[in-house]
Image: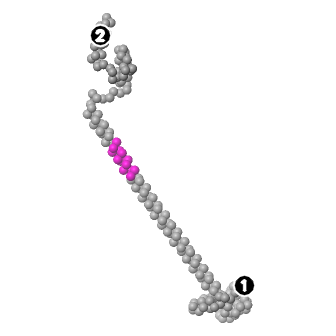
């Protein structure tokens, strides 16, 4: 129900001239009731009737109305500007969040690639070492094969039966097999 003048520049000059005019809350309420009660179609007569309701001149009422229109328009523009700024800030925040998410995913993919490369390298190294051990064992042959724990114990038990206490002195102090056979033969001959 607001009336906008044909020439905005004229309206602003009128509003500026009437800015000093003070309106009480009762006069403001009367202006609002008059704007609703008297339609725009009344023309200049409308402002005279509204002025009588407010105890103001028609010029003061019209200036107050234009001032209110300008204030409301300014508030709407400020609200729109604030909303636009908030939307832009939200869009910027969403863009930053998306960039961070993409960067995190790229970092995770890079770390996964490094982990797989490391696993592949470790597998290659294990295979290389296994091949080297296999080749080394083929070079040493069966003569250099390390006896198992059971084999060592069986040998020691057999030597203990012959009266040798190799466990106390250790396997490195035992006599060669030919010497052991000679000693066994001597004992046999002495025992007859």
Q: Main secondary structure of the magenta part?
A: helix
Quadrant of the rendered image containing residue 15:
bottom right
Taking the image as shown, residue 177 lies to the left or right of residue 104, namely left
Q: What residue sits 35% from the left and 27% below the top?
A: 148
**Does residue 53 show up magenta in the picture?**
no
Magenta highlight range:
114-126
The image quadrant where one finds the N terminus is bottom right
**Does residue 122 show up magenta in the picture?**
yes
Taking the image as shown, residue 24 lies to the left or right of residue 86, namely right
Q: Which residue is mark 2?
A: 186
**For mark 1, does the 10 Å Cα neighbourhood hold few (<14), some (14 to 19), or many (20 or more) residues?**
few
Q: In the rendered image, is residue 30 in sight? A: no
Quadrant of the rendered image containing residue 59:
bottom right
Taking the image as shown, residue 87 lies to the left or right of residue 115, namely right
Q: What residue sits 63% from the left and 91% below the top?
A: 17
- Above or below residue 79? Residue 20 is below
Q: Position of residue 37 (x, y in %)?
A: 70, 87
Q: What residue sits 29% from the left and 18% below the top?
A: 177
**For mark 2, does the 10 Å Cα neighbourhood hold few (<14), some (14 to 19), or many (20 or more) residues?**
few
Tag shown at residue 24: 1
Number of the front mark, 2 or 1: 2
Q: In the rendered image, is residue 60 in sight? A: yes
């Amino acid at each position: 129900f607001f009336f906008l003048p044909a020439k905005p520049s004229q309206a602003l000059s009128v509003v500026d001239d009437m800015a000093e005019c003070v309106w009480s809350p009762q006069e403001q309420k009367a202006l609002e009731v008059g704007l609703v009660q008297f339609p725009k179609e009344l023309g200049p007569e409308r402002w005279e009737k509204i002025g009588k309701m407010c105890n103001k001149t028609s010029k003061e009422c019209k200036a107050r109305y234009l001032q209110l229109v300008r204030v409301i328009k300014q508030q709407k523009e400020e609200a729109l500007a604030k909303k636009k700024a908030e939307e832009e800030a939200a869009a910027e925040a969403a863009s930053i969040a998306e960039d961070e998410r993409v960067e995190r995913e790229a970092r995770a993919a890079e770390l996964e690639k490094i982990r797989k490369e490391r696993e592949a390298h470790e597998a290659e190294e294990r295979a290389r070492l296994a091949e080297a051990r296999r080749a080394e064992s083929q070079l040493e042959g069966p003569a250099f094969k390390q006896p198992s724990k059971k084999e060592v114990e069986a040998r020691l038990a057999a030597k203990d039966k012959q009266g040798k206490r190799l466990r106390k002195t250790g396997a490195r102090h035992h006599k060669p097999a030919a010497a052991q056979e000679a000693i066994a033969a001597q004992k046999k001959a002495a025992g007859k």
